[in-house]
Amino acid sequence: MSFDKIIDRRGSHCVKWDMMEQLYGVSSEDGLAMWVADMDFPPPQCVQDAVQAMLDHGIYGYFGDDSKYRAAIQWWMQTRHGWTIEPDWIFTTHGLVNGTAMCVDTFTEPGDGVVLFTPVYHAFAKVIKAADRKVVECLLANNEGRYEMDFDAYDAQMTGNEKMVILCSPHNPGGRVWTREELQGVADFARRHDLILVSDEIHHDLLFEGHRHIPMAQVDPDITDRLIMMTAVTKTFNIAGSHVGNVIIEDPDLRARFAKRMMGLGMSPNSFGLFMATAAYSPAGAAWVDDLMVYLESNRQLFDDSINAIPGLKSMPLEATYLAWVDFSGTGMSREDFTCRVEQDAKIAVNHGPTFGTGGDDFLRFNIAAPRAVIEDAVGRMQKAFADLQ
Ligand SMILES: Cc1ncc(COP(=O)(O)O)c(C=O)c1O
């Protein structure tokens, strides 16, 4: 399959294209959708075949015996990430936003503080606030276009009311692949302040050359008794609509608490997600991800070179993810002004920086997981919209 093929997603109930006009005022007729984090590529043939086999069979009843599914997850974590897990550590939630909400619900109480390193994926704060917990923002330092942590500052901020910290690893937005030292710093921080550590590793497969993701569970064996790992097949293989995510818990006590909450809410996954995940976590799926990352690398280069050539704009160098995080502060324009140019002049729907929390004000996030021609079109529009700066 060539990633160059343009597939028209409009009119398919695709949030990214079919909601852009309503939410951003950018028409899908002549605009480009570069916001929601899904890709404009079909998944690998092995996944399509799994869905086709379901259709061919034609009965969609209750799913039983998920041993192959669990074995596939085990195989993927071992071969792609060097992480050994047991089948009974795995829970399947309705995606990882749901997984996050389940963790907040199970392991904290209303009024408790939940620490986030901001700017960070916006749904974390949404679920924390909706559950009547408090978001505690620990700001990432932007050191010459690279997000870094400052644990001395975070220690000084803690009040004792905090019960959980949620890490995004690799980081969205900004695309950092945290180093072993940084991850150890997070583990130590969680221990110092007696926090449950939730590590959302949904972007762990989307790594650019030269970067290696380290699962938090591999960093520090003594963190297990407070660690909740979250992974998903959906971001890697572009099957987010199947809404499956994995919460992986080694510690038996934490696991029992989580299992009870899942039971209490009557949660169980849909069969489409389980069939797709089992097919994706395979050698054929792995080969597709390798090809995908080669393609995305070229998109990233094209996007960054073109955006960075516009005076005042700076795209953060991505180590992982396909979500380019562009800093407009160098233009001296107001947020309204640069956003208006992107949306109204260039007609590109993007995510607004402030939705990611404190630290995001000067930024817009562009999804670059699209056929090359779309990226070429997008950067051409951007150059035109900011032509007066050249
Ligand atoms: C860090 C992070 N977690 C979770 C999600 C969404 O997860 P799901 O679709 O499984 O709810 C995203 C989507 O962009 C994300 O970036």
Image (tube, rainbow, N blue to C red):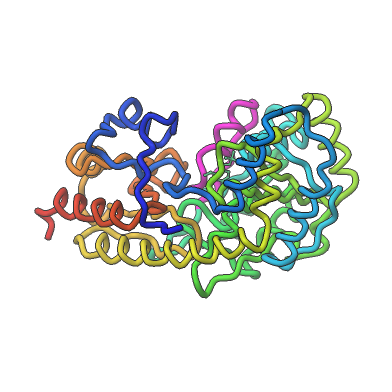
Residue lying furthest bottom:
210
**Placement of 292 over or under 348, stated as above or below:** below
**Placement of 324 over or under 253, stated as above or below:** below
Q: Residue at x 31, y 39 (%)?
A: 349
Q: Is residue 289 left or right of residue 90?
A: left
Q: Is residue 225 left or right of residue 10?
A: right
Q: Residue at x 47, y 45 (%)?
A: 38
| Res. 100 visible in picture | no
| Res. 159 visible in picture | yes
Q: Residue at x 26, y 63 (%)?
A: 308
In percent of width and height, residue 143 lies at 43, 65
> The magenta stretch spans which residues?
119-139
Given residues 138 and 356, the one toward you in this image is: 356
**Residue 122 in magenta?**
yes
Query: Where on the image, by quarter, is ligand 1?
Result: top right
In percent of width and height, residue 260 lies at 86, 31
Given residues 86 and 366, the one toward you in this image is: 86
**Placement of 349 over or under 286, stated as above or below:** above
In percent of width and height, residue 311 lies at 19, 61
In percent of width and height, residue 174 lies at 45, 56
Placement of the C terminus among the 4 image quadrants: bottom left
Q: Is residue 277 left or right of residue 387?
A: right
